[in-house]
Image: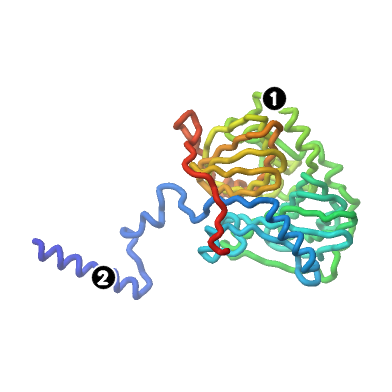
Amino acid sequence: MKKNNVQTQENLDLYYEGMKKNHLGPLWYDLGHMVTKEPVHDVEPYLWKWKTIREYVLKAGDLLKPGKDAERRVVYLQNPSLLKHGLVGYGTHTLYAGIQLLLPGESAPSHHHSQSAIRFIIEGSGAYTAVNGEKTYMERGDMVLTPAWTWHEHKHEGTEPVFWLDGLDVGLVRTLAASFFEPYEEESYPMETPENYSKMQFSMGAFKKLNESKQPGYPSPIYGYKFDRVKFLLDQMKETDNDPFDGYAIEYINPLTGGSADFRIGTMMQKLKPGQQTKAHRHVHSAIYHVIEGNGYTVIDGQKFEWEKGDFFILPPWSRHEHVNTGSSDVYLFSFNDKPVMKKLELEYVEAYQENEGHQIIEKVFVPDTSLE
């Protein structure tokens, strides 16, 4: 009997080796790797300090000129866990984040691409983004859409450096082998629409409370979303609007339909009052966070990420997370995510953390990866 078992194993080994040589595989052996019981990925959380980012972005201003030395002067956030797999420029498996700088008098030429993009203004004023010939002037805290395939360019008419976040679905589009890019035939696309036209038409209806149900749609007729309006709406929210997992939260929407402002990239602003701590949950969609105001920390799968104004951090898919405001003033967190895609594909799923009254036990504190230094 033992001899038969050895013979069977030898036969199986020969069988598997033959399949491998012919580029075939046994599903019964690999099913657990292919169809997992829950989401499996290589994305790990990470946090970048704004002071470090800003220093490198400003240095790029001394070394490179947009449109001449580079298509765009941008320093991107590289998730080290994904660089190990050769994924250059990835923040999560689907999302990219970069910090763009425009100095007074500079411009970045017009182009378009199949990636969707959002811009969130971090510092400065006096610059504008033009989308399909419509100027939208940018101030700190504003969010500007450049939907997929729209012609867009940037120009600075002010007197101080302007920094903003570029958020794109680079990883998603690359995975789907659908990336296209084209520069405009001239430096600037014709300005045919009055500046801030769409914002003036729809500025009162471009946001909704988190989880408020409306019908999705695309594209949004508005490109510019003003921070003062977002802050006003957050400050007007009642205690009954406080979400146990996200605090006081607003999503940016298409004002005509109530769907996500961009068809593929979701955007959200959260407010946490002093001392507020949310409960932990996890969801399939991933996100990249930017701290606009305040101090605190986020616990992601038992790891504590301490942040302050200007910092960025990664929230991987299907990772338990909760936020804490440790300061004496309100915290404002902006984030962009791939939730619209997950919902359209009916892949989105949310699960609350049930143990320890909804709060994780902190097992370690994040320390930046310096292995490449």
Q: The disc labelled 1 sits on which kind of residue?
A: Lys
Q: Nearer the viewer, residue 338 or 60?
A: 60
* Residue sitting at the far left: 1
* Residue sitting at the far front: 373
Residue 357, percent across and down?
48, 28
Rendered position, 138 above or below 359? below
Residue 61, percent across and down?
79, 63
Residue 15 is tagged as: 2
Residue at screen point 64% across, 28% down: 242
State the SS at label 1. loop
Q: Nearer the viewer, residue 42 or 346?
A: 42
Q: Nearer the viewer, residue 315 or 93?
A: 315
Residue at screen point 81% across, 65% down: 109
Residue at screen point 81% across, 36% down: 204
Rendered position, 96 above or below 206? below
Local packing at callout 2 (Cα closer than 10 Å; few below 14, some 14-19, many 20+) is few
Q: The disc labelled 2 sits on which kind of residue?
A: Tyr
Locate residue 257 relative to residue 325 in the image: left or right. Answer: right
State the SS at label 2. helix
Residue 163, percent across and down?
77, 54
Query: Which residue is labeled 1 in the image?
Result: 238
Locate residue 205 relative to residue 335 in the image: left or right. Answer: right
Residue at screen point 36% across, 56% down: 31
Looking at marks 2 and 1 on the same chain, the residue that comes earlier in the sequence is marked by 2
**Can residue 116 be seen here?**
no
